[in-house]
Image (cartoon, helix red, strand yellow):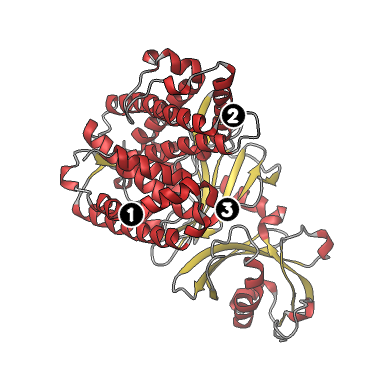
Amino acid sequence: MTSKKAQPEVNTSDFQFKCTWEEAFEDQEFIKTFSTEILEDYILKKRWYAGKSSTLKYIEVVDHGKLSSDKHTYYGVLIEINFSEAFFQDYFIPLSFIPEEKEKLETGTVIAPITFQGKDGYLIDALHIEDFRKLVYQKIMDYSTDDPETKVIFHRLETVKPTKYKSSRFMGGEQSNTSIVYNGNYVMKFFRRIYTSKNPDYEINRFLTEKSQFKNVPAYIGSINLALESGDTITLALMQDLLENEGDAWKYMLQELKSVFSNIEKKKINVRRLPDIPLYQRQPINTMPPEIIDFAGLNLFLKVSKLALRTAEMHIALGSDMQDTAFTPQKYNGDYAVWLKNRLIYMFQNRLNTIENNMHKLDGEALELAKEFLDKKKEIREHFLNFDWTRMKSERIRIHGDYHLGQVLVHEDDFYLLDFEGEPESTIQDRKVKQPPLKDVAGMFRSFHYAIYSTIFNNDGSFKTSNDDMFAAGEILYKYMIGVFMETYVDKVQTENLNIGYKQEIEFLLDYCLLEKAVYELGYELNSRPRWTIIPLRGISSILKNKKH
């Protein structure tokens, strides 16, 4: 076999195998060439590949499953990518061999030209073959409780009426997962990066649909899991209802805020006279100061209240099960405190290194705030270490874990919550740890802060107000948005007996989680858009000022 390095132009004759396609994964020569030569080139170009900032050492095929339709044989292949930095990632690729002219295939789907027993063709990602998409859809729809347990487990919710396959299409661009819309009413998310455990998105979505009354999520329809001999389960795909929507809440919030900020000039509002309130102070909409209503209108606050209600209902549902231990509320304990502190100190040290190495990218207020951050590193570290679990009276539950405006869909004046996979930087085990529900609340508050700053930063000339005035108004608006959210959220969870603690504990946890979120954001901003670093830096600065000693 010709080495790829010696002959960079890949043509069919580069990859010739004596086996047939049907025997490919019993053939050691094919497996070796596939993992060492064929796959590397392909995977580095894919959007869902999360290892681009690391050095790939080698790829190994760890498992595979075979699936056949009347027309083709397909393989679901699990690969482990090992990196020089001494860690690995697992991925799932469905494979097909198509003996056709390349012109008939969609671009970007061809993994390599290949020959099996003299038969020329192309190795491609099977999701781009309609026959494969139809096959997995029918396997889910044909699910029966009488099915014998197999390695690949197809499941359909029993209350879902099976329907025949009509059509399938890709949804949006290539993301970290690949989503297929079926029959115009279901969406199947194929997880590309996978974990030796049930995916939290599958686990939480199925739980909320099967065992709770919470309706503001895309309903669980079915799934594909892989049962390993070790007893572990790997989630390969999740099928849900396709929600009609008018876009996500981030886009919606930016539109709202644009009209709010344009009021400053339009209504000649004196920003310096807007009444301020303390952070976290609960604010019923009906007692809102008239100056704030004049500035921001009522609609923004009504929407924030509705979002708070849906967030509270999600948490009530996630902490409601007394049988399923994965969803039973838990008290704080020493193990949790050790886990939390280790995780946060590791993240904090990482962000300190990032900021020290990137100071040259900053100027003006961002540079001043970065210096303040470094000056206060001892105080921030102590804040993270100051988690005294023995004083916590509230409970921990399964949470969304990566909650922000982009994870919420808007439809007919209501909000639907999605994507329960958890924080991208966290391990799969960490994503399943029960945490304070206020961590999600803090994530949403940071998202509000971002939306306000984004509106000011992306001023396309439509605001004549000075940036200083807009920032001053924005900070006050932020506190009222939080106040309205807190009023609705706290009232709802306490009415339903979800224990989030009393005022002092709530404020301690919000401070703690907001600081964690803002420090987490620092790394992303410094690496990808330094101009925005001022957002988490201002957040950190105000949290430290607000902290009650």
Could you say which is closer to the camera, residue 297 or residue 131?
A: 297
For mark 3, what is the residue? 177
Q: Choose top left, top right, bottom left or bottom right for residue 320.
A: top left
Q: Disc 2 to disc 1, how far (Cα)?
A: 37 Å
In the rendered image of this protein, does residue 295 appear above or below residue 206?
Answer: above
Instruction: Please give the name of the residue rendered at 54% of the width and 48% of the height, measured from the top-left corner.
Output: 531
List x then y, in percent, for residue 366: 47, 48
Q: Nearer the viewer, mark 3 or mark 2?
A: 2
Q: Disc 3 to disc 1, how far (Cα)?
A: 40 Å
Numbered disc 1: secondary structure: helix
Numbered disc 3: secondary structure: strand
Whether residue 403 is visible here, answered yes or no, is yes
Residue type, numbered disc 3? Asn
Whether residue 436 is visible here, answered yes or no, is no
Q: Nearer the viewer, mark 3 or mark 1?
A: 1
In the rendered image of this protein, does residue 451 appear above or below residue 464?
Answer: below
Residue 375: mark in rendering:
1
Q: How many marks?
A: 3
Q: Are marks 3 and 1 in contact (CB under 8 Å)?
A: no
Could you say which is closer to the camera, residue 92 or residue 528?
A: 528
Could you say which is closer to the camera, residue 392 or residue 132?
A: 392
For mark 2, what is the residue? 255
In the rendered image of this protein, does residue 36 appear above or below residue 452?
Answer: below
Residue type, numbered disc 1? Asp
Q: Nearer the viewer, mark 2 or mark 1?
A: 1
Residue type, numbered disc 2? Gln
Q: Is residue 519 left or right of residue 162?
A: left
Assess disc 2: are there few (<14), some (14-19) or many (≥20) residues with their C-alpha within 10 Å of its C-alpha. Answer: few
Q: Quadrant of the N terminus?
A: bottom right
Q: Quadrant of the C terminus?
A: top left
